[in-house]
């Protein structure tokens, strides 16, 4: 019956996900979330079924009256290491119904670990990475097998000489002494009847940071020699089960990876390779036994996150031979990642691969813009320089396993003659699906959008970072500034949720957060005012609005409440000068108190909104009143009504209050007008916090042409100026020849990527999950063609124009309020629109 209805109605269900992932392995949340998409009708009711048998459903949610396609499981407690199936039936307002095919997920090991934590040594300064191996016998036909591995550090897992999985830099970086992640692998196809061998190679990662830099990660309280715990469960076709676990009977030896640092580079000596070390027939009699260790943390949870992968292979655009011993490879674009090189040469030949973002005039790589915070104690760990020592046994290949870098150029240094057979770069980042698309007749706008996305991905490597070379730190300010750019363009919720858990791990008892997360202790004393650590408010709220999912609010409400409590107790006047301020401005510096108080207000207001969503009416009113008090105090201090300006009328001083809603309603237009006048007079003159606000403040204030002129500007200072000077990513500083703060792959000025959607396309969520959207497109006179596409939780939204035709596509279940621009035939008006494709004519 359901198939018949499905066929004749064209109603169908797709993109069934559990915990925002496709058929995930190893989840361990008590109430996993189910999401789906409805095509061909507007959902009014749904029903969920869950079972361990796809033909016999043991749990049903009952028929729910709800139009949004999200449900949190509320049935019997899920069992560990169990495959579950689920399906959804949907009813629509058109009187149709359809049932999805069965999706699946598998629970993880949860808390039922049997293996021992083991290591090879307790020496944190020992440099070579350790191998571990264990031999076992499989005597019966296998139905399925799963390996669960938790690690302090990084790892690669292999079975019978076969590397398992395609993840890179697993597990993700956390506050290791408070929470460690484990990963689940399906290893069924890697096992064989008879003798088998399992192998593990451990890397340092952020767990055992041996390189020295200004953030003191080498002094982190969790630092130790890498360690792991593993349980391998084998289910046989006869219904029995066998477990293979890590323990003191595992054997260990040092590997040819003679040094690895997540921060600097990796060194590999091919002369030390141990052929077949992870195969069953290898003789490990000379290897020593592993050492049992305590777990790094008491909390070991599943890594239910989009993994880091090598997502793109990039070939050189040119290779320059500078002399007999130096070649420089140009990959044509700036990325986060690694290089793989295939060479031939004599035994003992040392090949160095130095990675850089720019070149000196003589053609050699220049790393002076990215090594400023490195504090080496000797010359054995050169910055961003891999070292490959050849075995002399024919063609040899090297690619780092436990490191990534930020670069466009690679300088190959070798004093001995070698033959380079191949070299490639690999773009490394969290493999988050693309969700949005921008297309324009202005090629400069396209390139800025592409550069913004490249910088965003380069700084989304298991957590949001500032840059992939000089720091690799989870700077909070950079992350919340760029969060909407990320959420319009990519499906990043799982990475953000993981990072918010890092926030909760790092939060002090008094509510204070550090400026970089995770941290080994640095950042509680500098740069962690509300202008930066508003991540704990802004990102959960953005996730709720963009995904329609309350879980980020529920999980972070108490943390935000403690943080706001600290602010209210320590800054009862309603003003705070705690913060970094408008970081790296063009020339003018706005008062730190102005910008930090704006974020103070924003945090308190978001907390009130969260309380409302979660049904806490008392908190909702309490924090709304506090937000009003901060707003009034702010305006009393900084607003000059007779001039309709804040402070001295700098661009950031005007844009930030406009963007964050601090301007009294009756003065908004005048303040926006004054901002436009200032921009026309001075060009762009903002730093990080001003950049977040200025384009949207202008657009919302009726000055779209001024905003567009800034966004499409080709002269200094501007995003276009970077592109005109060859940038493929966003820079850290407006001048391209700045003497400091000049990383060439930074995301902090990346709000322009969201502005394309919010201002030109005009799309903004008015209610959670885009169930209601506000559409206020702006069509610049010079822009012949432009469109944005966004895959919302309810389907694809499209807004754009070509020539005199504007089109808005609204998916089922979405209501749109279109503010028709005055340039449209028929003039300005507001229309309430339902699902469908709507077209309008633009005046010639």
Image: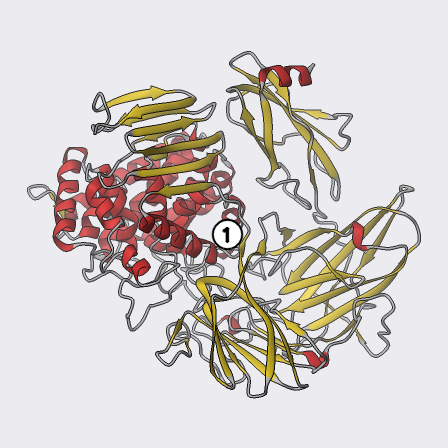
Asked if one can make out residue 256 in the rendered structure from this viewpoint, the answer is yes
> On the image, numbered disc 1 is attached to which residue?
499
Quadrant containing the N terminus in the rendered view: top right
The total number of labels drawn is 1
Residue farthest toward the top in the current orientation of the protein: 95
Find residue 106 and report its image quarter: top right
Quadrant containing the C terminus in the rendered view: top left
Front residue of this view, candidates 53 and 322: 322
Residue at point 50%, 46% (across, down): 492
Asked if one can make out residue 575 in the rendered structure from this viewpoint, the answer is no
Position of 518 with respect to 689 (left or right) is right
- From the top left corner, tell me how far across and down residue 276 is, in percent: 80, 70
- From the top left corner, tell me how far across and down residue 352 is, in percent: 55, 80
- From the top left corner, tell me how far across and down residue 602 is, in percent: 32, 43
- From the top left corner, tell me how far across and down residue 259 is, in percent: 61, 77
| Colour scheme of the picture | secondary structure
Crowd around label 1: few <14 · some 14–19 · many ≥20 (10 Å): many
Position of 51 with respect to 596 (left or right) is right
Q: Secondary structure at mark 1?
A: helix
Residue at point 75%, 44% (across, down): 81
């Amino acid at each position: 019956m359901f198939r018949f209805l499905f066929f004749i109605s064209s109603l169908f269900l797709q993109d069934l996900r559990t915990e925002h992932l496709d058929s995930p392995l190893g989840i361990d949340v008590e109430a996993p979330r189910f999401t789906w998409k409805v095509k061909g009708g507007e959902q009014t009711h749904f029903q969920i079924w869950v079972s361990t048998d796809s033909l016999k459903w043991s749990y049903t949610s009952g028929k729910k009256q709800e139009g949004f396609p999200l449900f949190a499981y509320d049935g019997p407690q899920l069992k560990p290491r169990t495959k579950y199936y689920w399906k959804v039936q949907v009813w629509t307002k058109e009187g149709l119904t359809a049932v999805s095919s069965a999706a699946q997920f598998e629970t993880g090991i949860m808390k039922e670990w049997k293996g021992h934590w083991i290591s090879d040594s307790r020496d944190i300064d020992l440099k070579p990475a350790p191998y571990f191996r264990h031999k076992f016998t499989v005597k019966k036909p296998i139905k399925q097998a799963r390996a669960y591995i938790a690690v302090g550090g990084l790892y690669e897992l292999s079975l019978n000489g076969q590397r398992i999985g395609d993840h890179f830099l697993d597990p993700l970086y956390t506050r290791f002494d408070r929470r460690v992640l484990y990963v689940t692998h399906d290893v069924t196809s890697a096992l064989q009847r008879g003798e088998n061998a399992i192998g593990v190679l451990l890397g340092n990662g952020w767990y055992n940071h041996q390189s020295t830099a200004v953030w003191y990660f080498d002094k982190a309280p969790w630092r130790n020699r890498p360690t792991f715990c593993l349980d391998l469960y084998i289910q046989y076709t006869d219904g029995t089960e066998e477990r293979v676990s890590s323990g003191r009977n595992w054997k260990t030896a040092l590997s040819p990876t003679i040094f690895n640092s997540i921060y600097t580079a990796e060194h590999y000596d091919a002369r030390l390779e141990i052929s077949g070390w992870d195969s069953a027939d290898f003789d490990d009699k000379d290897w020593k036994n592993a050492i049992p260790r305590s777990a790094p943390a008491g909390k070991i949870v599943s890594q239910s996150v989009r993994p880091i992968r090598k997502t793109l292979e990039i070939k050189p655009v040119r290779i320059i031979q500078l002399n007999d011993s130096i070649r420089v490879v140009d990959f044509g674009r700036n990325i986060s990642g690694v290089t793989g090189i295939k060479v031939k040469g004599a035994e003992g030949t040392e090949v160095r691969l130095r990675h850089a973002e720019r070149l000196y005039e003589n053609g050699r790589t220049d790393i002076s813009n990215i090594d400023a915070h490195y504090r080496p104690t000797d010359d054995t760990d050169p910055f961003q320089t891999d070292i490959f020592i050849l075995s002399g046994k024919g063609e040899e290949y090297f690619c780092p396993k436990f490191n990534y870098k930020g670069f466009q150029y690679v300088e190959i240094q070798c004093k001995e003659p070698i033959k380079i057979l191949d070299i490639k770069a690999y773009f490394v980042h969290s493999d988050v699906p693309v969700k949005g698309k921008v297309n324009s007749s202005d090629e400069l706008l396209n390139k800025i959008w592409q550069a913004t996305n490249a910088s965003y991905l380069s700084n989304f490597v298991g957590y949001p970072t500032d840059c992939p070379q000089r720091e690799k730190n989870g700077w909070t300010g950079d992350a919340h500034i760029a969060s909407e750019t990320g959420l319009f363009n990519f499906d990043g919720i799982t990475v953000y949720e993981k990072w918010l858990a890092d926030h909760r791990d790092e939060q002090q008892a008094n509510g204070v957060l550090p400026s970089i997360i995770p941290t080994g202790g640095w950042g509680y004393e500098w740069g962690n005012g509300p202008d930066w650590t508003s991540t704990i408010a802004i990102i959960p709220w953005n996730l709720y609005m963009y995904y329609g999912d309350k879980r980020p609010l529920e999980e972070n409400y108490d943390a935000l409440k403690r943080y706001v409590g600290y602010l209210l107790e320590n800054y009862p006047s309603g003003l705070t000068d705690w913060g970094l301020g408008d970081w790296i401005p063009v020339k003018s510096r706005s008062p730190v108190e102005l910008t930090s108080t704006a974020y103070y207000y924003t945090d308190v207001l978001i907390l009130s909104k969260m309380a409302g969503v979660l049904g806490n009416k008392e908190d909702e009113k309490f924090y709304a009143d506090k937000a009003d008090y901060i707003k009034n105090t702010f305006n009393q201090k900084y607003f000059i009504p007779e001039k309709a300006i804040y402070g001295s009328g700098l661009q950031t001083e005007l844009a930030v209050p406009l963007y964050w809603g601090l301007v009294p309603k009756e003065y908004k237009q005048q303040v926006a007008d004054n901002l436009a006048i200032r921009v026309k007079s001075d060009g762009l003159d903002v730093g990080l916090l001003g950049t977040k606000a200025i384009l949207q403040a202008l657009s919302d204030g009726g000055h779209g042409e001024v905003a567009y002129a800034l966004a499409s500007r080709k002269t200094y200072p501007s995003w276009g100026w970077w592109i005109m000077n060859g940038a493929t990513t966003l820079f850290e500083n407006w001048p391209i020849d700045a003497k400091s703060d000049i990383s060439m792959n930074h995301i902090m000025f990346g709000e322009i990527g969201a502005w394309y959607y919010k201002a030109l396309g005009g799309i903004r969520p008015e209610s959670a999950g885009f169930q209601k959207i506000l559409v206020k497109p702006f069509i610049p006179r010079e822009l012949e063609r432009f469109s944005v596409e966004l895959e919302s939780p309810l389907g694809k939204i499209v807004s754009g124009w070509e020539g005199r035709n504007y089109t808005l596509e609204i998916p089922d279940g979405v209501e749109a309020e279109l503010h028709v621009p005055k340039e449209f035939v028929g003039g300005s008006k507001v229309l309430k629109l339902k699902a469908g494709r709507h077209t309008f004519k633009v005046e010639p």
